[in-house]
Amino acid sequence: MLDKKDLRKIFGRAAYEVQLFKEKDFIRKQCPHCGTFFWTLNPDRKDCGDTNCIGGYTFIGKGSGKSWDFHDTVKNWCKFFEDEGHTRITEYSTVARWRDDIEFTIASIACFQPNVLNGTIKPPANPLVLPQPCIRFGGKGFNDIDNVGRTGRHLTSFIMGGQHAFNSKKLGYKGYWMDRCIELDFQFLTQVLAIPESKITLREDIWLGGGNFGPCLESFCDGLEIVNSVFMQYEVLPDDSHRQMEMTVVDVGWGVERIGWYATGTPSVYEATFGPVLTKMKKTVGLKLDTDLLNKYYVLSGLLNVDEVDIKVERQKVAQKIGIDYHELERVL
Ligand SMILES: [Zn+2]
């Protein structure tokens, strides 16, 4: 069976070098921490921008100068893509629509699998956007419960900003492909979310699932992955060789809550998403928090992914970094 390691040999620089990178003279570098190749406009940049590689989130307490609440974020995100020729469609149910291998909608693209992707049913619009409610509390690879409250960024129920375009000569679908997609995504990050261009890194990766695969570019800023732009392009054949899919699909998943979090720079994604509700709950139960300590803690909380590290060991390191006794930190949390 093909895995990402085999596929990395297929995808080199050329598979990722979109028009925007050429026009703006992006530089391709390799991260010394994780070995991933990434693209940047900053000649001095060394790391890929992932939380683990830069040692935490560096936008906490700063944000990008926006005071959006969650509804503003959804509205601003949809409006940008609508102005750029996308049709906003109505969200689907959180109960899986057609796929029988999952119970719940775990990503926006799942709403179109398999019937739109196999050409049986026409996409409702092309290109399209939808702020799709998704649930991840069960099933292989789709359970984020243990990370909720630990990393500051995980949620079991969230809105995936789905940006999709479908391309097929046979069916006459004319969406768009990598050049236009990355141009749009970079434009949203820099012009709407107001992130300085030189702060953004685009990491090369490969998406693989359901017998298809393709290159993807993950956009990071200050330790936070805000969007993953996936290009479904190849199908795996029984002998592990592969061929170009007749229909290629742009499958971009925006972390809508993360957009709002980055915009406002609150300590965690929860304040940015549930702001007034959290404030009321804290008031109701009379909870007084050590804000200074928590702000320091949340900068480092991105390192506490239970899928990747031993939480106790990492928390001890975090306590040391912020200069507090480990047991005292545990008590506060
Ligand atoms: Zn890295």
Image (spheres, grey):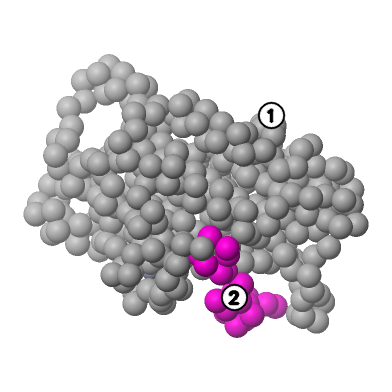
What residue lies at 15% left-to-right and 42% top-to-bottom? Answer: 293
CB of mark 2 near ligand 1 (< 8 Å): no
Q: Secondary structure at mark 2?
A: helix
The residue under label 2 is: 14
Where residue 130 appears, x then y in whole percent? 64, 36
Residues 92 and 130: in front is 130
Residue span colored magenta: 1-22
Taking the image in four quarters, ligand 1 sits in the one at: bottom left
What residue lies at 18% left-to-right and 47% top-to-bottom? Answer: 296
Whole-number angstrom distance, CA of label 1 to CA of label 2 = 36 Å
Q: Amino acid at mark 2?
A: Ala
Tell which tag, 1 or 2, sits nearer the viewer.
Answer: 2
Above or below, comparing residue 110 to residue 280 in the picture: below
What residue lies at 38% left-to-right and 54% top-to-bottom? Answer: 197
Residues 289 and 234: in front is 234
* First-in-chain label (1 vs 2): 2
The residue under label 1 is: 90
Labels 1 & 2 near each other (Cβ < 8 A):
no
Q: Residues within 10 Å of mark 1 (few under 14, many from 20)?
A: few
Above or below, comparing residue 163 to residue 310 in the picture: above
Q: Amino acid at mark 1?
A: Thr
Where residue 192 appears, x then y in whole percent? 45, 38
Q: What is the chief secondary structure element of the magenta stretch?
A: helix
